[in-house]
Amino acid sequence: MTLRQIVSGSLTAATLLSVAVGCGSSSNETASQVQWIPVAGTSRASLEKRDLEDKFLFGFRVVDTRGFFTTALTLDLQPTLVNLKLARESAAGPLKLFAVDAGNAFGGSSLMAFDATEKRDGGIEIDFSTETYIELTEGLINPLGGQVTEEAGDSRKATWKSASGKKPRVLKISQDNDTLVADVEHTISFTRTNEDGRLESRTGSVVLRVFLARQNKAATKAPVTVGDARKKNIGFFGADDFARNNDAQPIVRYDFGKTRETKIVYLKDFPSDMVETGKNAVTAWNIGFGFDAFRVEIAPANVDIGDPRYNVIKWFNGLEKEVPWAGYAPTMADPVTGAVVSTQILINGSATRQDMEALAAYTAQASQDFKGLKGKIGNVPVVQGAGESPVVTFFTDADQKDPKAFAKGFYYGVIMHEFGHSLGLRHNFAASTKLDADETPSSVMDYEPNFVASKRTAIGSYDLAAIRYGYFNESPRAALPFCTDEDLAKRMDCNQGDIGNPVDYVIASLLSGVGFLENSTLALPAHVEKPMMGSIKNAGKLYSLTKDADERDELFKAVLRVRDAAPASDLTATAKKTALSNLSKLKASFDSVKDSLPSALATLLEN
């Protein structure tokens, strides 16, 4: 999944040194032989005056949260192409402020502002500790993990305020010939509304990694555009993510140059037993390129996410339940050429791993109780179709014996999926309607059911075709099923978390799931709070789209079965208590989506 947020700074003084959005480099420009000048032991960094001659990419991301909402990790400003321009309060006046101005692309607002001093040698010394607060604007797809709920006038904005007037603290400044990276910790307070309607306030801090990176003038535009790819039923992100529906945009992709230089991808903070999984998930994509496009190494101490010099996949622990994703890939790309500046992938580590291991252990227990979940559970048949083992959505795989092995397989798929985003690929939720020889969906860019995820060993046939087209302009040899995020509500074959025929799958999922919960003597794992919620949503969507009366009738009966679920009559008193507890979670699933069900289906359910 790839979210984008915009951050703007509030300026109380005139903008004196501004960074204005540029429109690309001219062919006769030459790079200045700049030397970034670090100012050791202070909160300051220095630029040379001749840096004003070049174009730079400006951006930042949250790289750490300390006592604050961990959803803040999804906040990033993607690289914005800028020119450094000098301005003063008066023609002869001194430089007092360094400000980053987004120009018209961001509504003309300034993004960030810092105190600055002009030195005698013509250099500019920037104090990164002077940005006092940040105004956050929701991204184009989603607000910040549901975090931005406090509204003040403009419903798209909320403010992180400096706690008790505390000044930001510069933790580290790193500079080389082409890049400046500053880590700045902001102590902030914020209030949000939880799902239950209660206000939750929290004071803590976030660390912003801010960067200026000289534009790579050697990078060329991709051989195809977003529109070219879509005509071939292939989905790529556009160079300018805010214009992702602009068919004329060059696609996002790595530029390997004429020498096909191998790119290094670093694994950061990975548990030792997950390192091999991470390496294999990345290098599995090399088959699409026909050479060793990527090599994976363990990250040295100085290599981390948010630094445009490095491709990094970082394992995070302690994200708890605030973060709804297993992986997140806010890839940095040049907004003009589409060339990837660096891969930045965040992996939800300990919490998700524990959940996946618990789910696999639970499935192993359940399979013993119900003889591998084959045949019937009570009076409800468990459907075993192509690729389905079993169809019940909150299970892993009835044949899975080792929870740790399942978790590794799960992360293999997650990392492969997120790295696919860094290669430029968008989601493909129709891939599950066409299975490859190993009975997995034809693209890892789909959202695969849990019981499929651990079986994947390679990229899919769609993924291979997408790489060959996007990077080498080789047209696919066969028709490819494709749909992406904006197609979800419009198409029968475009769904998350299913496999095979969408209608058959969702009906089997609901009936099998209800049958299991009505008869099970096993309490659901604690983290399974709303079983089959996705299937209930998909059933409602398919009901609204299908023109087949028989399909509508079967979908209605399946959803009705969920609504009326009750413990099996032959259960013991103890087993009935367990079933009631499990079914209360199923009711929570139904209640959470019933208001979004199509009106015709909702009317039938009320009668």
Image (tube, helix red, strand yellow):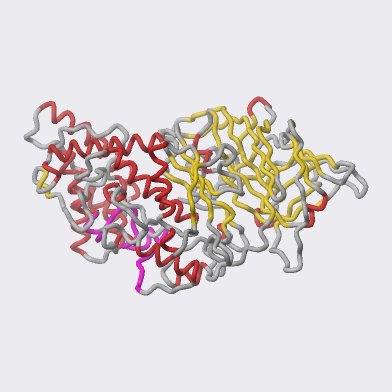
Whether residue 601 can be seen here: yes
Q: Is residue 578 above or below residue 462?
A: above
Q: Nearer the viewer, residue 152 or 376?
A: 376
Q: Is residue 196 above or below residue 144?
A: above
Residue at the far left in the pictured view: 570
Whether residue 607 can be seen here: no
What residue do we see at 64% from left, 48% from top? 59
In the rendered image, residue 393 lying in the magenta stretch gets the answer no
What residue do we see at 30% from left, 45% from top? 533
Q: Nearer the viewer, residue 333 or 311?
A: 311
Q: Nearer the viewer, residue 319 or 486?
A: 319
Quarter of the image for residue 347 reads top left
What residue do we see at 53% from left, 69% from top? 225
Q: How many marks?
A: 0
In the rendered image, residue 489 lying in the magenta stretch gets the answer yes
What residue do we see at 47% from left, 46% from top? 328
Indicate the position of residue 282 as horizontal and vertical percent values: 44, 52
Indicate the position of residue 244 as horizontal and vertical percent values: 53, 61
Residue at the far right in the pictured view: 92
Indicate the position of residue 364 as horizontal and vertical percent values: 20, 38
Span shown in magenta: 478-505
Q: Main secondary structure of the magenta part?
A: loop
Q: Is residue 544 above or below residue 372?
A: below
> Residue 584 vs residue 33: left or right?
left
Q: Nearer the viewer, residue 173 or 184?
A: 173
Indicate the position of residue 346 as horizontal and vertical percent values: 48, 43
